[in-house]
Image (tube, grey):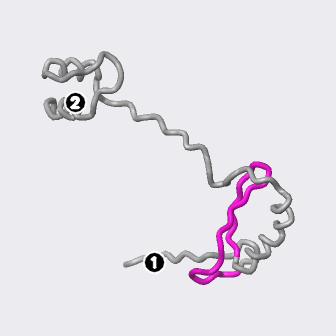
């Protein structure tokens, strides 16, 4: 038996079911809180018209889509880096006492100890 899931876009303001390709998903922010709303083209135009006097009088502070791009911390390695360094030196590789170990050295260590 097959199951078919059908997604319908519905105008959040008046409940109108929108056809494929109709309507807009709008994102906006008020007092530091972000919102998203699905609207028909007509209601989207009304939304923009209602905000126009405020937008025209406001100062732009940049794109709302720009968010902090903090990097996720790297995953903790299962390798004992001291063992990798000892193996690398014993097998002719040059490695420092601290810091990152070059990828090819780590791969060679893994291959030799697989």
Q: Position of residue 111 (x, y in %)?
A: 16, 34
User: Dot 1, crowdedness within 10 Å: few (<14), some or many (≥20)?
Assistant: few
Q: Position of residue 35 (x, y in %)?
A: 71, 59
Q: Nearer the viewer, mark 1 or mark 2?
A: 2
Q: Magenta region's main secondary structure?
A: strand
Secondary structure type for disc 2 = helix
**Residue plotted at (78% across, 71% down):** 47
Q: Which residue is mark 1?
A: 4
Q: CA distance from mark 1 to mark 2?
A: 50 Å
Mark 1 or 2, nearer chain start: 1
**Residue plotted at (23% across, 23% down):** 84
Residue 14 quadrant? bottom right
Q: Which residue is mark 2?
A: 105
Q: Quadrant of the N terminus?
A: bottom left
Magenta region: which residues? 16-39
Residue 37 quadrant? bottom right
Q: Quadrant of the C terminus?
A: top left
């Amino acid at each position: 038996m097959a199951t078919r899931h059908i997604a319908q876009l519905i105008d959040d303001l008046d409940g109108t079911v929108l056809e494929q390709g109709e309507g807009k998903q709008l994102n906006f922010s008020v007092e530091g809180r972000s919102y998203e709303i699905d609207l028909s083209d007509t209601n989207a135009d009304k939304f923009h018209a209602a905000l126009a006097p405020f937008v025209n009088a406001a100062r732009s502070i940049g794109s709302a889509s720009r968010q902090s791009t903090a990097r996720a911390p790297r995953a903790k390695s299962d390798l004992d880096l001291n063992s990798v360094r000892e193996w690398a030196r014993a097998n002719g590789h040059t490695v420092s006492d601290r810091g990152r170990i070059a990828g090819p050295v780590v791969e060679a260590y893994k291959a030799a100890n697989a």
